[in-house]
Amino acid sequence: MQLKLRYNEHSKRPLAGAFLQGASPAGWFRELDTWKVDLNGLRCYVLPQGIHDDSGSGLFVIFGTQQPPAALVRYPYGRMTDKLYLPVQADLWPVTGADELKALLLWDIQVFHPNIGLVGFESKDEVKLTDFVHLSAPRPSDWSFAHPGLTPAPVLQQIGLKVEDEPESVMEAIKEDVGSKSLDQIPSADPDETALQKYGKQATNWLAQLGLYMLLLLALIGKIIFAPLSWFFSGAFPRSGSSGGLLHKIEQWVGQKLADIEKQRDTELKRLMDLFDKNSDEALQYAIPLSSPYLNRGSAPQSGKLTRRQTQFNLRNLGGGRRVDGWDLSNYNAQLRARYIKTANEAVEQGNFKRAAYIHAHLLGDFYTAANVLQQGKMYREAAALYRDHLKNERMAAECLEKGGLLEEAIPIYLQLNNLEKAGDLYLMIGREEKAEACYREKVTEFRQAKDYQKAAVLTLDKLKQKKEAESLLLEGWADTGQPEACLSAYLELRHDDEHGQLAQEVRQVYAQHVPRLKKTSFLTVLAEMNRRYPEAQLNETSLGIAYEIIHQQVESGDTSGLKMMSSFLPEDRLLNADTNRFIQHRLQLPPVYTKPDYIQLRNNTNWYAIMTYHDQLMAIGQQQGDLHYFRGNWEGKQTYQYLFKVGYNDSPLALLADPALSDQVLIVGEKISTHTNQQLGAYSYFEREAVLQTLDFLPEAALGCCLNVENGVSVLHFTIHGLQLSHFNRTGALLRTIDIGMMDERVNPGQNGFDPSAMVWRKGHFYYAKGEILLRISPEGQTEALSIGAQILKSTVTGPHTALKIALLTTEGSVLVTPTLKGIGVASGFFGQDIEGQDIRLMTDNRLVVAGGKRAGVFDISKENPTPEGLIDTENTIIAIVAIPKRHHCAFLEYDGRVSVYRLGDV
C-alpha cells in the first residue's frame, strides 16, 4: 500500500508549521520577517529537492508558542501526529489507523510535501537560523562624518479604487438610459398624420386648455363678486326662472370640456397599453410611475387638474412625494403594473439588470426587488444605497458592499451593527491586523460577559490563534451551567490534537481536577461521545474504568442517571440495556417522588418572552440586560443556554417560529433584526433531533405575517402601495417570487394590522392568516377567501399537518372553532370560554383546547360538535404562554418567574 496526499478543502487541521520555498536563506529571512514572531522559538529543517537530489529546495519551520497570522503563511502545514506534518488542506489516502501510522513513522520528524514526497528528519538535522548569518569583519572607518540620510518613504497601507459616481448619480443615469418622454409623444394610431399636424394639434390642445382654465377662473371670480349683490337685491327684484344665468352656463360648458380632456387621457393610456404589447422598450419611455419618489418620470401635458389615487395604507411614505402632474389610473393601474412586471422579468432574462431595477424602483416603488435585481447584476454599491437609504437595512447594505469589494465602506456599518467579528475579518483582509485583533478581543469579552464560553473559545482559537487561552475558556464553560458538555467536548478535542494518542491521560486529569459530584453524569455523556469518535484501546479502557467508578457511587445513593448510559461504554454487549432496566425496576428500592405539577425552572435573571416545542425539545428566547439569550432543553430537565446577540431595551420582543413537520428551521422573528444568526443545533444524547437556528432578517417592509412553507422556505404576507402581496423566499433569504393577491373584500383592511408572526400558517395546501376580524385563506396562486368572525382576533392556533385541520381563534368575545374544507371555510362553533380573559390559546394533540390568561387556564374538549369545558388550572404566577408538549394528556405553561409548569390534564 502506498500512502498519498489527497486535497480536502474542508480540513480543519490547526496551523503548526510552514514551508518557505526557495534555496536562498535571504528569501527565507524576508518571509520570516513578515511574521513578526520570535525566531528563537522556531524549529527549522532544510527540505531536499527530491530523493535523488539532496540540495535544498526550501526551509520547513515548526512553530513554537507564537504563531504568525494564517493570512501571512503562504504554505501552511498542520500536525497529524506528533511526528507527521501535512499541508493543512490535505489528508492521507487511504485512511490509516493510529497504530498502523505509528508503525510507519520511523524518524523523529516527517514532512509530507505534495511534490517532494515524504521526508524524514532526525533531531540532529535541525538547523539554527544563526548558521545562515555571517557578519563581515568591521572596517576601519571614521563614522564621525556619518549623516542620517533621507527619510524613508512611508509604508504603503492601502490601494483603493476611485469611485466615479455616487449611487444616486448612477440611479439617475439608469433613468436617462431608459429615456423620458411625454404621453402626448406616443406614436399616433393614424400612420398618415404628419409631424406638423401632430405638433399643431398639441399646440391647439394646450391653448384650448389654457383658455378653459381662464374661463373657469373668471366664472369663479364672477360668482364671488355678484354673490353679495344678489343677496342685497334679492327682495327688490323677482327671481329669474333661468337655470343660473350666464356664469352658471359658462361653468357647465367648462366642466364639459374638462370631461372631454379626461376622455383624451383615457385614449392616451390605451395607446400606452398597446405600445407595451408591441414594443416594451419604447413604451418604457412614456411609462408613468405607479408609486415612486422619482415622480418626474412620464410627465403629462399641461391639460388641467390631474389627480392621484389615494390608498388606505401609506407604506411609511416609502415612495416619498413631490408635487407632480399626476394621473388617475384607477382603471389602468393593475394592467400597467402587470406590464411593468413582465417587462422587468424580461430585462432580467436578457441580463439588463439596470433596466429591471429602474422599473422596480422608479415605476413600481418596489425597492426591495430592485435591490435584489441589482445584486444579481453585481451592482453592489447601488444595491447597498437602496438598502441603506430607502429600506433602512444596514446589514444587507454592508453585505452588498462586502461582496463588491468595498471593504472600507462596509466596516463602519458592521461596527455600528456590533458585528465585531465580521469587522475584524474585513480589517484582516485589508492588512490591518491590530484593528482586527482589537475587534476580536472585544467580541471575546462580550461572549465571556454573556457566559457563552464556547463561542469565545472558537473565536480565540480560529481568529486570535491562542490555543491555550481557548482551552482555559472551555474549562470555564465546563464549570458553568450554560453549555458544559459542549465546552468539555471541545476542550478534549483540542487536547487530542495536542497529545496525539495521550487523550486517556488527559481524561484522567480532567476527571481528577474538574469534575464535581453534580457534573459526573454530564462527564459520562462527554466521555461516551469521545469513545465513539476515537476508538482507541487506551481511551476505551480508561473511560470504562471511570464509568464503573462513577456509576457505582451513583447507584449507592439511588441515582440511576449514569447507569442508563452503561451500554455506551460496552456497545458489544447487546443485553446490557435490558439488564440495567430490569435492575432499576426490580432491584433498586427508590423512594417515590410526588410532584404536582412538575416544574422546569429556567434562569430567573432572564425575561423569557417566547417559548416553543421542537419535536421532543423545549426552546425559548429571553432578554437579560440588553442581551438576547437562547434556551434549549428537554423534558427530563436537561438545560443549555447560549448568548445570541444584543438587543435594544425598547425594541419589541422577538418571537420563535418553527414547524417541525415542514422544516428543520427555528426562526427568530421580529420586524427589525439587524444581526444575522445561522447556526446548526446538533443532535446528541439529550437531543435526538438537530435543527438550524436562524434570524429572519430579510422581511420586506410592512410585513403582516410570515410562516414556514412546504418548499423548505419562508413565505411573507405584506402590504404595498399596490395592495396585498405574498412573497416566497428560500431559507437563505433570496427572493424566489412574489404573488399579487386579488383582495376585493371591503371587510379586509390590512393597513390597520401590525406585524404578527403567529398570525400566519401553512396547512393542507393553503396559507391561513388571522387578524382583525377576518380569517383569510390564500391559495398558492393568490386566490383568497375571507371569513368574518364578528370579533377582534387576538391569537390563533392550528392542528398539526398530519391531523384533521382545525383552527381555534381567541377573540375579544371568547374563543371560536373554524373547520376549513375543500369547499370553503366556516365557523364550527359559537363563542365559548368567555369567563377566561384569554391572552393565549393552544390546540393539543388529544382533541383538547387550552385557553389561558392571568393566573388561570381553561381546558376544553373539542372532540364533539360543541366544545365542552373539562376544568380549570390555577397557576402560581402569571401565564406568559401555553406550551404544547409531545406527551398526550399533558400541557405546560411558561410563567412570569421563568418556570415551566407541566400539568397532567386528566388531573384537572
Image: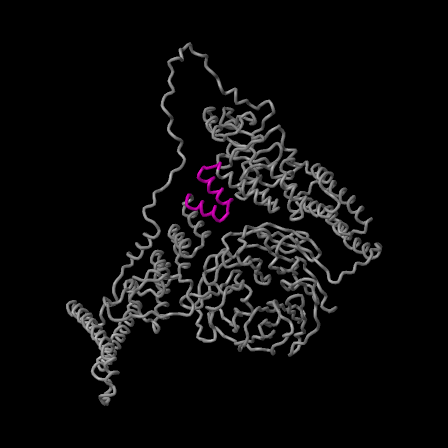
Residue 189 vertical placement versus 519 (above, below): below
Number of labels in the image equals 0
In the displayed structure, 573 sits above or below 748; it is above
Residue farthest to the top, as pictured? 140
The colour scheme of the drawn protein is: one colour
Q: Residue 301 at x, y = what percent?
A: 24, 67
Residue 140: x %, y % from top left? 42, 9
For residue 342, above or below residue 55: below
In the visual, does 364 lie left or right of 745? left
Name, please, the residue furthest toward the left: 196
Whether residue 363 sits left or right of residue 717 in the image: it is: left
In the picture, the quarter occupied by the N terminus is top right
> Of residues 229 and 479, which is closer to you in this image?
229
Residue drawn at x 17%, y 69% as measured from the top left: 203
Residue at the image point whose x is 52% and y is 76% from the top: 787
In the image, is residue 416 part of the stretch drawn in magenta? yes
- In which quadrant of the rendered view does residue 16 lie? top right
Residue 688's quadrant in the figure?
Answer: bottom right
- Magenta stretch holds residue 571: no
Q: Give the main secondary structure, helix, strand or loop, of the magenta stretch.
A: helix
Q: Is residue 805 visible?
A: no
Side of 256 where 71 appears, left or right: right
Position of the C terminus by quadrant: bottom right
Residue range corresponding to the magenta coloring: 408-434
Q: Answer whether residue 577 is visible to the viewer in this image.
A: yes
Q: Position of residue 449 (x, y in %)?
A: 60, 45
